[in-house]
Image: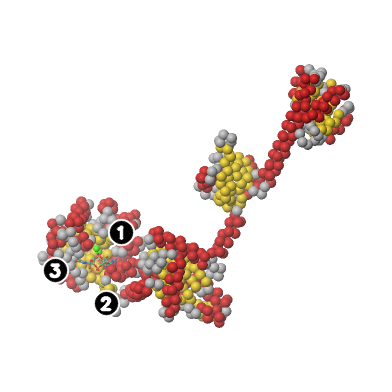
Amino acid sequence: MGCAVHVLLIDDNPDDGALVLRALDREFPHLHVQQFSDQAAFDAALVAGGFDLVITDYHIGWTTGLEILRAVKHLHPYCPVIMFTGTGSEEIAVEAMKANLDDYIVKSVTHIARLGAAARAAVTQVRQSQALAEAELRYRDLFNGVPIGLYQTTPDGQIIDANPTLLHILGYSDLELFCTLNVRDLCVHPEGFELLQHALVNHGGKTRDFVAQLRRYDGSIIWTESCTRIVYDTHGKILYHEGALQDISERRGAEARMNYLAHHDDLTGLPNRVMFKFRLEQAIAESARRGTLLALLLLDMDRFKAINDTLGHAVGDELLKMLGGRLSGCVRDCDTVARLAGDEFALILPDLTHAEDAARVAQKILAAFAPSFNVDGHELFMSASIGIATCPADGCNLDILLRNVDIAMYHAKEHGRNTFQFYATEMNTKAFERLSLENALRHALERNELFLHYQPQFDLRTGKIIAVEALLRWRHPELGMISPPQFIPIAEETGMITPIGEWVLRTACAQNKAWQVGGLPHLRVAVNLSPRQLRQSNFIHVIEQTLHETGLAPCYLELELTESMLMHNTENAIAMLTTLDAMGIDISVDDFGTGYSSLAYLKRLPINALKIDKSFVSDIPGDLDDAAIASTIIVMAHNLGIRVIAEGVETPAQKDFLMSHDCDAMQGYLFSRPVEPDKIPPLLVSSATR
Ligand code: C2E
Ligand code: CA
Ligand code: CA
């Protein structure tokens, strides 16, 4: 035993006392023994404390060993007491054991050898348990005092213990109440606990920096970061989970703020160059992955420097803010508008259908900048030079795209500013053509440049005209006739198809009614619908209104839809078609065979007719595949009670094939091209007399 051992010895026999001393001396190199011959001295020592062991005889002049034992244990419950006596009895020994005696040694030459070892064992044990108790106390203090939340839970998340800091973090005042909870009760996100379990399993029973949102007692939500580990027993069985947790709400708020500041321009609030590059890189990867088209626009304000120089930076800053605002108004939610530097802005436009769409945005921006800016009483006129590069055409990586869009922007400046230029020069002509067509189309309706031609459909059995299809025509004042495949997609994309489509519907219905009023045989007029029209919520109302205004009976109107229109919004489509069907309007599926050609939906929808696409018709009967497809469509449609019309019939051979396969009707140049409305009455009259 290294450090000093302090022993109280009570034995009034000096010989025995010497015997004990010798035995102790051998065990403890640093020994301090206090011997007593009266009660008062002993009592004083007892109160003073600081001893490690008490050795007492049983028979003592002034008291008994039992009394000594009781007195010691009363004041120092953990201090070991050894009774060393030659006069004891068994009863005394039992009595002493009841009073918590630590050891009992009979005074004899053989037993004295045991005294040293017994003393040593007693002292060691008490020192160890003292150390343990102290350690426990220290750890409890630490557990209670650390400024980090500590907890233990069962593997299933039931809380076993928590320190006051954890209770404080989570707003609980009562540990007992807290220990009725499960971690799941605290998690804001239902899957929070499961995520933690996964993390534990995946990281060998330990997690670090596990971030989760927890709900406090008062319902408020905090961000926390925790480290948890699984505690096992020596056999590897899971005992419990324990961990430490911190409230990081403040830090997260600051981080979010820092993050925002690092990625945004503080003047305009737009993403800055860092963010822009990050987003562009993501957009490039996304476009490569999905095979979509991406455009990058680089904008440089024309003569911005002059404003800064003459009106000062405050005015310049204000103007930049306004520019940022107008720019943001020109794009979709998925687009990015960033301020790269000074008066340089950039736009990322993912997911475009055509490269020309980028030109449309550029044009929109130039138009948005056209109205003057009022800054501080100054009326400022601004314009921009815009470069456009597209991905993948003009480059598939960030650096090349940035370089090319820069080149394009300089071309725009050379082109006299307030304009845009593509990096790929051939795009400029295409985009320009498309845009001017688009602009012209905007005025086509009001300038009466649109009109309808009608193409008759013949009943293959009777040879009579049973319907006419209304086909849209546009005569451009300079470019002359523009074919539907050229302008209908533009009308679709820009949304102009909605008013145009309504005009077609009204004109066709009115025309049909006029023929009827003129005494001609009654027939249906078929009108082509665009997907956008079908998506309109008031579409049914538009139809009703049109029929009402023109006075045409619903059974003389047929609507042509394509397969994809039906496939893409089935639920909606079913509801709408059912209503139209109930109104008595005919529905036909146009271009059948080019799309999904799924008969399953035909069964579910109230369809009256299928139009076999002219691409199948053009090669029959020579092309065996097409012939097989056409005849199969006819058989299947008839099985479903659906009429079949063949489109684009140009030769007698085609007609013969279709007739022999029981096709119901046909439409094509063989009988008539689409013609002006006044060519229809003579056709009707001649077909009626056939
Ligand atoms: P569609 O509905 O398949 O119309 C039939 C097209 O085939 C018409 O072309 C017609 O002129 C042409 N055609 C008719 N018979 C023959 C033939 O024997 N041989 C050949 N080679 N072609 C024939 P068009 O008028 O150029 O119309 C093209 C497409 O434009 C139409 O295809 C339709 O999808 C769309 N369209 C036309 N008018 C409208 C409209 O008012 N609204 C909407 N949404 N789309 C329309
Ligand atoms: Ca059609
Ligand atoms: Ca067609």
Q: Residues under labels 1 and 2: Cα distance? A: 32 Å
Question: In the displayed structure, would residue 285 be above or below residue 164?
Answer: below
374 up-or-down from 686: above or below: below
Asked if the residues shown at circle 1 and circle 2 are in contact, with their CB atoms under 8 angstroms apart, the answer is no
Which numbered disc, 3 or 1, marks the residue closer to the eye? 1
Q: 169 or 520, which lies in front?
A: 169
Residue 289 sits above or below residue 94 on the image? below
- Residue nearer the viewer, 556 or 4: 4
Look at 23% across and 58% down and name the residue there: 610
Q: Which residue is mark 2?
A: 480
In x, y percent, where is residue 443?
34, 75
SS type, badge 1: helix
Q: Assign the N terminus to one quadrant of the image.
A: top right
CA gap between label 2 and label 3 equals 32 Å
Front residue of 188/621: it is 621
Query: Which residue is label 1 attached to?
Result: 564
Viewer can see residue 69: no
CB atoms of marks 3 and 1 within 8 Å: no
Ligand 1 shows up in which quadrant of the image?
bottom left
The colour style of the image is: secondary structure
Quarter of the image for residue 497 reads bottom left
**Amino acid type at mark 2:** Gly
The percent coordinates of residue 615 (x first, y second) are 22, 62
Q: Are marks 2 and 3 in contact (CB under 8 Å)?
A: no
Question: Of label 1 and label 2, which has the lower sequence position?
Answer: 2
* Disc on the earlier residue, 2 or 3: 2
Q: Secondary structure at mark 3?
A: helix
Q: CA distance from mark 3 to mark 1?
A: 37 Å
Residue under the point 58% across and 62% down: 258
Query: Can you give x and y, in whole percent of width and height, for residue 507 in the image?
Result: 27, 70
